[in-house]
């Protein structure tokens, strides 16, 4: 690299890109949300995604040219984050777009001017690729720009035919690579050698739409879609060995390193990987939450939860025991607030969500890490963690399957995925059965037990955890003295913090534990004052008269209570807004949904359906 190439901050690189295209009559637009309007993708994965309807001819643009710095998230290569120089989950894509205005020649000219004049990259350090059949682009680079033909590489569809996804706008592309070692010559250029080359600018000549059958149809207008990775250009201009050591990410890494009392430059490669994962993922979660994504077990909420959990776990790997994520997040917010003021405006919301998820997962780790270590120790010779063990970690301790796989890979182990899925299906069947009424055989046994067992003392209004005595153990309706691991049982305690299903609110879930004993509680039913805990013995043996620690799942309790309360709020709102004669006939407050039945006179139905949004 020559000394004439300037050092530019990430902010300066972003600003110069946008201003360059603004002078050529491109409208500068703010980044779209990470939550896309396109229902076919979970997250915004490319700079062009907000313009997809325009490229498809479904929508008219208010301007023929635009330029943006777009927030993007991709998690398809999450296992490579921190292990390669340039893989990220969160990245910024600088782009210039033409909607039926200029096309290939002008896009190439401006890309070269920006690269060599604005960013002052030496022409001899740039190599260009084109689609193998795109003779037009090859000729433009050689004859108009003056790139030597030996530094223009023809590439196949895999590399140089760009698409946003399996379907949608697509077209041939031309990519610009920075050559860190032009002194090695042009005889054997291998653009996949990422120690020598880094692709920094992609020019897509958007000409087609690909349908679900793979058929290409010409678009109404020829369009231009380009993307320059901000982090990659920062690596080039800041003369650092990887994207992580740029001013866009490294301050976040340094914050985490300081918390762990680690000198990054002297750290082991394994420690550096964890620090890079933290740096990358914290950027992701800060921007996701600022765009109103909250953690859940589905869709983009699950992506967020997974990223937060990876941050927490990698923090543990470098010696951080307590909470730390918000201190690191503050650095990420400071780095982003000028370009994206929303992250500062919503910092309280962001930090509250992060703190909640971090606290929950720290408890999960504390419960499950010891068992996982035991499982790894006993399965090292087999080379695989069984599906049963993986499911126990998931269902009993809240370990996501992906986390178990990651930890297993660190010990060169695999996980029996098929076995895990079998256990999952069986659990779903058990859960379905448990939410029906108490089995008649159980009821018969309860009638007999009620003759000499006092009603259960319910503690759940004030206590979420208590010590209790086992009054009875039932297997398939028959009273037994003991039950061992793997057995489906019903347990009656002398007192319990577990809520029994009543009034439309389902029973609590949680655990009963003792010395070397773990029992998972799937449901609780109440009959004649006796609380019956529907359980599975996960580990150990339980006996009548034994004393156990009963602990409810607080998160499940809160979700059920919230949904149960919501049914009453909806009813009250309908009575106020529509008609006071409306009444609630029944309800269900579950973990992830609520349902309620209403009684309304026919004349009121239109008002009710209008509020719910039905036509």
Image: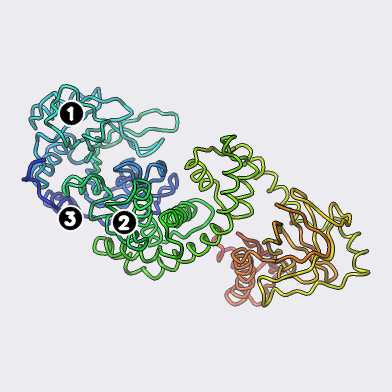
Closer to us: mark 2 or mark 1?
2
Residue 53 image-quadrant placement: top left
Numbered mark located on residue 137 in the image = 1
**Residue count near mark 3 (Cα–Cα under 10 Å), binned few <14, some 14–19, many ≥20:** some
The earlier-in-sequence mark between 3 and 1 is 3
Residue 178 image-quadrant placement: top left
Residue 460 rendering spot, x and y as whole percentages: 70, 73
The earlier-in-sequence mark between 2 and 3 is 3
Residue 445 image-quadrant placement: bottom right
**Residue count near mark 1 (Cα–Cα under 10 Å), binned few <14, some 14–19, many ≥20:** many
Residue 169 rendering spot, x and y as whole percentages: 34, 37
Residue 103 rendering spot, x and y as whole percentages: 19, 37
Picture quarter with the C terminus: bottom right
**Residue drawn 9% across and 32% down?**
145
Numbered mark located on residue 253 in the image = 2
Q: CA distance from mark 3 to mark 1?
A: 32 Å
Task: Identify residue for label 3.
Answer: 9
**Residue drawn 25% across and 60% down?**
339
The earlier-in-sequence mark between 2 and 1 is 1
Q: Vertically, is 2 above or below 444?
A: above
Relative side of 266 to 539, left or right: left
Closer to us: mark 2 or mark 3?
2
């Amino acid at each position: 690299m020559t000394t004439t190439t300037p050092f530019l901050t990430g902010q300066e690189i972003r600003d110069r890109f946008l201003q360059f295209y603004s002078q050529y009559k491109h409208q500068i637009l703010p980044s779209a949300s990470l939550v896309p309007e396109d229902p076919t993708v979970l997250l915004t994965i490319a700079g062009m995604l907000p313009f997809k309807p325009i490229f498809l001819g479904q929508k008219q643009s208010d301007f023929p040219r635009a330029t943006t710095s777009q927030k993007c998230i991709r998690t398809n290569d999450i296992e490579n984050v921190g292990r390669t120089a340039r893989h990220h989950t969160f990245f910024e894509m600088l782009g210039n777009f033409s909607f039926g205005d200029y096309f290939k020649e002008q896009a190439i000219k401006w890309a070269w001017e920006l690269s060599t004049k604005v960013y002052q990259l030496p022409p001899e350090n740039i190599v260009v690729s084109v689609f193998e059949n795109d003779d037009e682009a090859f000729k433009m680079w050689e004859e108009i720009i003056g790139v030597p033909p030996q530094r223009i590489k023809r590439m196949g569809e895999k590399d140089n035919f760009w698409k946003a996804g399996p379907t949608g706008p697509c077209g041939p592309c031309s990519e610009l690579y920075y050559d860190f070692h032009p002194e090695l010559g042009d005889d054997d250029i291998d653009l996949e050698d990422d120690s020598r080359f880094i692709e920094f600018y992609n020019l897509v000549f958007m000409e087609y739409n690909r349908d679900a059958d793979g058929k290409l149809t010409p678009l109404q207008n020829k369009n231009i879609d380009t993307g320059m990775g901000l982090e990659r250009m920062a690596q080039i201009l800041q003369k650092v060995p990887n994207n992580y050591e740029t001013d866009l990410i490294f301050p976040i890494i340094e914050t985490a390193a300081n918390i762990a009392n680690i000198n990054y430059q002297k750290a082991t490669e394994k420690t550096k990987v964890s620090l890079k994962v933290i740096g990358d993922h914290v950027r992701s979660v800060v921007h996701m939450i600022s765009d109103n994504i909250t953690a859940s077990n589905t869709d983009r909420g699950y992506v967020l939860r997974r990223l937060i959990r990876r941050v927490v776990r990698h923090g543990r790997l470098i010696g951080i025991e307590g909470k730390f994520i918000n201190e690191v997040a503050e650095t990420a917010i400071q780095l982003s607030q000028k370009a994206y003021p929303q992250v500062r405006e919503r910092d309280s919301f962001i930090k509250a969500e992060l703190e909640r998820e971090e606290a929950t997962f720290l408890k999960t780790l504390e419960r499950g890490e010891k068992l996982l270590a035991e499982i790894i120790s006993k399965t090292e010779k087999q080379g695989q963690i069984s599906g049963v063990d993986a499911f126990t970690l998931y269902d009993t301790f809240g370990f996501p399957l992906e986390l178990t796989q990651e930890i297993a890979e660190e010990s060169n182990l695999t996980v029996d995925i098929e076995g895990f899925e079998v256990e999952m299906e069986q659990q779903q069947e058990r859960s379905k059965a448990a939410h029906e009424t108490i089995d008649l055989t159980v009821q018969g046994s309860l009638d007999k037990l009620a003759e000499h067992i006092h009603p259960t003392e319910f503690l759940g209004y004030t206590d979420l955890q208590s010590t209790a005595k086992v009054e009875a153990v039932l297997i398939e309706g028959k009273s037994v003295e003991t039950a061992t691991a793997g057995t489906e049982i019903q347990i009656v305690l002398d007192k319990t913090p577990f809520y029994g299903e009543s009034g439309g609110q389902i029973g609590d879930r949680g655990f009963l534990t003792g010395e070397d004993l773990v029992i998972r509680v799937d449901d609780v039913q109440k009959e004649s004052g006796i609380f019956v805990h529907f359980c599975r013995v996960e580990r150990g043996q339980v006996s009548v008269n034994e004393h156990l620690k009963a602990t409810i799942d607080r998160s499940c309790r809160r979700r059920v209570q919230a949904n149960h309360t919501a049914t009453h709020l909806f009813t009250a709102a309908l009575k106020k807004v529509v008609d006071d004669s409306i009444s609630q006939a029944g309800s269900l407050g579950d973990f992830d949904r609520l349902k309620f039945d209403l009684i309304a006179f026919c004349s009121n139905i239109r008002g009710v359906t209008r509020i719910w949004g039905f036509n």
